[in-house]
Image (cartoon, rainbow, N blue to C red):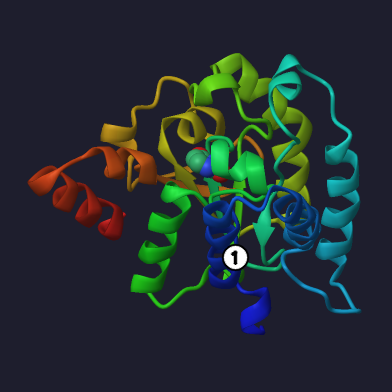
Amino acid sequence: MDFEESPACKQYFASKIRKAGMKGKAREHQLDFSTRCFTGGHTREIMSLKEEQLQSLAGELTSCRSCPLREDCKAPVGWYGCADSPLVFIGEGPGGVEDDYGCPLIGPSGQLLDKALWSVQITRDRVLTSNIIKCRPRGNRTPTLAEADFCGKIWLERELAILQPKVIVALGTVALHYLGEPSMRITRQRGQWFQTRQGFDCIATYHPSYILRQYGKEQVQAKWQVYHD
Ligand code: URA
């Protein structure tokens, strides 16, 4: 993959645009950026079957108005990465940066996820990242279980049916509750394998935002726990 198309390059430009306050230019970029994100950053002529199916799903997602969350966000945020990857990371839902740029996990949490992946020689374009809910809740609040269930059934289940991942990593409580059971606790069940309703092997770990909220020794300990998970 060219540097031009890498997540690092996109992050670089995103921060440049923000710093320069180039609003019109930013919007132009956002369009280009989200089209690329939906196709996993690829501009190849030949797409795999999964990429084609995902692209058609992305077309439907763009016009989704199935729930009130859509009214408070810029646009639904889909997935990013390699459709043929055996490894899929599922977060909670888009935050402010993701809503602005139309790509999942590119804000502070996503950047920490990148570092965790780099520590085991994986770059983001080799895996697929997505979220349980596709529209940013107003004020960045945590989505309710009902919202997660409603959105997840319409979009995530269809994504996963196309992707057929070998392993799903659930990031944090919302993903664990949706992919596993609402009675599961991230502190107890992290690092343990379970099967999702659709029969995929899944393992949960702390959400990167949880780690970012820790300080000092606690943060170091949480990072090691995620590394071991
Ligand atoms: N951004 C995302 O895309 N997902 C999260 O879970 C958090 C921030």
Residue furthest out toward the bottom? 2
**One can see residue 195 in this view:** no
Location of residue 185 in the rendering, given as x and y in whole percent from the top left corner? 34, 27
Q: Residue at x 73, y 29 (%)?
A: 153
Q: Does residue 54 appear anywhere in the picture? A: yes
Q: Residue furthest left?
A: 217
Q: Position of residue 19 (x, y in %)?
A: 52, 55
Which residue corresponds to the image point at 48% horizontal and 29% vertical from the top-left?
174
Which residue does the numbered mark 1 point to in the structure image? Answer: 13
Label tally: 1
Residue in view at x 32 percent, y 38 percent: 210
**Label 1 packing within 10 angstroms: few (<14), some (14-19), many (20+):** some
Q: Secondary structure at mark 1?
A: helix
Tell me if 192 is positioned left or right of 197 in this view: left
Q: Nearer the viewer, residue 47 or 5?
A: 5
**Is 154 placed above or below 72 here?**
below
Q: Amino acid at mark 1?
A: Phe
**Which part of the image, by quadrant, shows the N terminus?**
bottom right
Residue depicted at x 79% and y 55%:
28
Q: Nearer the viewer, residue 207 or 202?
A: 207
Q: Is mark 1 within 8 Å of ligand 1?
A: no
Q: Give percent across and percent down for residue 60.
A: 90, 40
Q: Quadrant of the C terminus?
A: bottom left
Taking the image as shown, residue 211 lies to the left or right of residue 64, namely left
Residue 46 location (% of width, % of height): 90, 78
Q: In the shown orientation, is residue 115 left or right of residue 77? A: left
User: Where 75 falls versus 137 (above or below)?
Assistant: below
> Nearest the camera: 208 or 100?
100
Q: Nearer the viewer, residue 201 or 159?
A: 159
